[in-house]
Image (cartoon, rainbow, N blue to C red):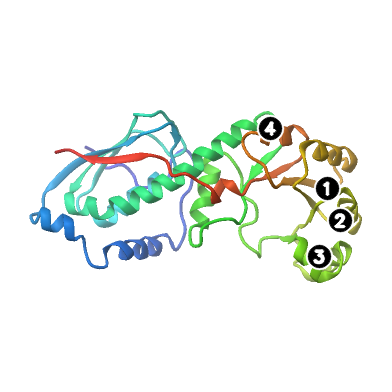
């Protein structure tokens, strides 16, 4: 069995300056008192072999991270990867085979699988959304509705699945929403203040709930208008009226059953919080040979 590179495949780059520190913290959470079960049941060190298998159809994401975790816990780890990051995998397909010291494999198994299953769940759903809007101009994007501490990884999974990222954090763009408008007094006042005080290179986006607010936002100089909880027909009307003066984003109540309708309405961006906040982990197993 040959070592496989613990890196990136199919052009997907999973790298962050804090990634190793995160793994250290995550492992400490699970191994603060050691692995009592493994060492009491198998007191002697021994080599083990095993394989990871997809228990459902999925889009694989997080493989480099899974291997990075196991490399931290397992001496003499050898891995043979049979698939690539971002690849569509059929139920029953073997993802990889591995060999290493059994205590190390079991010490990193749960953390590695948790991450792999969670990110694969995101990528799998993102691919469904990307496929649903294929052939239109619309891009499906995520939101800031991510788990604390996992935003970087969740957004990576969204990209692996074929969708796109919205602003990364509160400093990544001006997004004026209802409470900002209430605080500023009006849409026009909020936009004008943002133009005066925000970094000049940032786009200004305004969330609106009706056509009167949309017109006020455009008149005030917004670069992007978010159409909040509008129907596909209302979005199509907005597209016709705006005539490409601004970027239009549809948001709110959008799911796999209606995302194509919003895309065909002609909006540029479709934001879907469920890409990261309502994910079912993919079913992937790691079984060792007896």
Corner quadrant of residue 40: bottom left
Q: Secondary structure at mark 1?
A: loop
Q: Secondary structure at mark 2?
A: helix
Which residue is rendered at x = 48% and y = 53% of the image?
153
Task: Give the labeled residue for mark 1.
Answer: 246
Is there CB contact under 8 Å for labels 1 and 3? no
Mark 4 and mark 1: Cα distance apart in space: 21 Å
Residue 286 visible in the snapshot: yes
Query: Of marks 3 and 2, which one's residue comes earlier in the chain?
Result: 3
In this orientation, which residue lies closer to the viewer: 168 or 261?
261
Residue 137 visible in the snapshot: no
Residue 181 - label? 3
Which residue is rendered at x = 43% and y = 38% of the image?
60
Mark 4 and mark 2: Cα distance apart in space: 26 Å
Task: Give the labeled residue for mark 2.
Answer: 217
Query: Of marks 1 and 3, which one's residue comes earlier in the chain?
Result: 3
Query: Of marks 4 and 2, which one's residue comes earlier in the chain?
Result: 2
Which residue is rendered at x = 21% and y = 37% of the image?
1
Task: Give the labeled residue for mark 4.
Answer: 260
């Amino acid at each position: 069995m040959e070592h496989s590179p613990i890196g990136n495949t199919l052009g997907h780059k999973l790298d962050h300056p804090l990634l190793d520190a995160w793994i250290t913290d995550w492992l400490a959470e699970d191994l603060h008192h050691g692995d009592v079960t493994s060492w009491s049941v198998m007191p002697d060190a021994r080599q083990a072999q095993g394989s990871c298998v997809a228990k459902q159809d999925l889009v694989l994401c997080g493989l480099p991270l899974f291997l990075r975790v196991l490399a931290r816990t397992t001496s003499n780890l050898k891995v043979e990867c049979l698939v690539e990051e971002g690849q569509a995998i059929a139920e029953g397909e073997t993802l990889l085979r591995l060999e290493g010291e059994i205590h190390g494999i079991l010490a990193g198994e749960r953390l590695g699988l948790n991450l792999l299953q969670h990110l694969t769940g995101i990528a799998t759903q993102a691919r469904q959304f990307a496929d649903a809007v294929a052939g239109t101009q619309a891009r499906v994007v995520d939101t800031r509705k991510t788990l604390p501490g996992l935003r970087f990884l969740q957004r990576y999974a969204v990209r692996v699945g074929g969708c796109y990222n919205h602003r990364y954090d509160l400093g990544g763009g001006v997004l004026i929403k209802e409470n900002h408008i209430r605080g500023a007094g009006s849409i026009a006042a909020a936009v004008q203040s943002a133009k005066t005080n925000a970094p000049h290179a940032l786009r200004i986006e305004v969330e609106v709930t009706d056509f009167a607010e949309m017109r006020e936002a455009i008149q005030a100089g917004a670069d992007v208008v978010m159409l909040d909880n509008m129907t596909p027909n209302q979005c199509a009307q907005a597209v016709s009226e705006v005539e490409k003066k601004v970027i239009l984003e549809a948001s709110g109540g959008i799911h796999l059953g209606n995302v194509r309708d919003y895309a065909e309405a002609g909006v540029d961006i479709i934001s879907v919080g469920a890409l990261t906040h309502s994910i079912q982990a993919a079913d992937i197993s790691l079984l060792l040979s007896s």
